Image (cartoon, grey):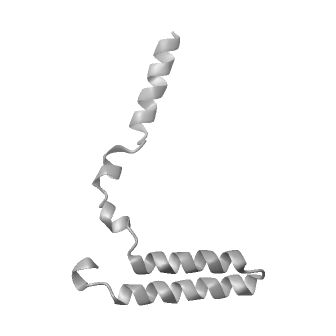
Amino acid sequence: MRLAIIAGLLSVGLFAGCGGADMESRDVEAQLLSPCERECLAAYRTCSYQATTPEELQVCSDDSNSCAAACSLYLAPAAR
């Protein structure tokens, strides 16, 4: 009886989509950050760690967004 319950729960987990084909079809390279984007992220983390007020944290966020926008300008047309 316990074995049937365990087997049922395992099959529900597999059918529920724990990974599945959807995860395999994603392009891994599209998820990687460029060196420019990594620099932006590092700068944001440093800035947000040192921020002491919500205003300073907003400045960090704004700087990060403009940095990421500048990075996207330098991407080759084939990479977009």
Identity of the residue drawn at 49% across and 87% down: 67
The residue positioned farthest toward the right in the image shown: 53
Task: Name the side, left or right, on which 69 lies relative to 54.
Answer: left
Task: Name the side, left or right, on which 41 lies relative to 54.
Answer: left
Quarter location, residue 32: bottom left
Q: How many marks?
A: 0
Work out whether 42 lies above or below 14.
below
Residue toward you, 47 or 10: 47
How far across and how far down the image is residue 30, in percent? 33, 67
Identity of the residue drawn at 29% across and 61% down: 27
Identity of the residue drawn at 75% across and 82% down: 54
How far across and how far down the image is residue 41, in percent? 52, 76
- Quarter of the figure with the C terminus: bottom left
Work out whether 32 lies above or below 64.
above
How far across and how far down the image is residue 76, in percent? 26, 84
Residue toward you, 49 or 77: 49
Residue toward you, 46 or 74: 46
Task: Name the side, left or right, on which 18 lies relative to 43.
Answer: left
Identity of the residue drawn at 41% across and 42% down: 17
How far across and how far down the image is residue 7, in percent? 44, 20
Work out whether 22 lies above or below 16.
below
The residue positioned farthest toward the left in the image shown: 78
The residue positioned farthest toward the top in the image shown: 1
Quarter location, residue 70: bottom left
Quarter location, residue 49: bottom right
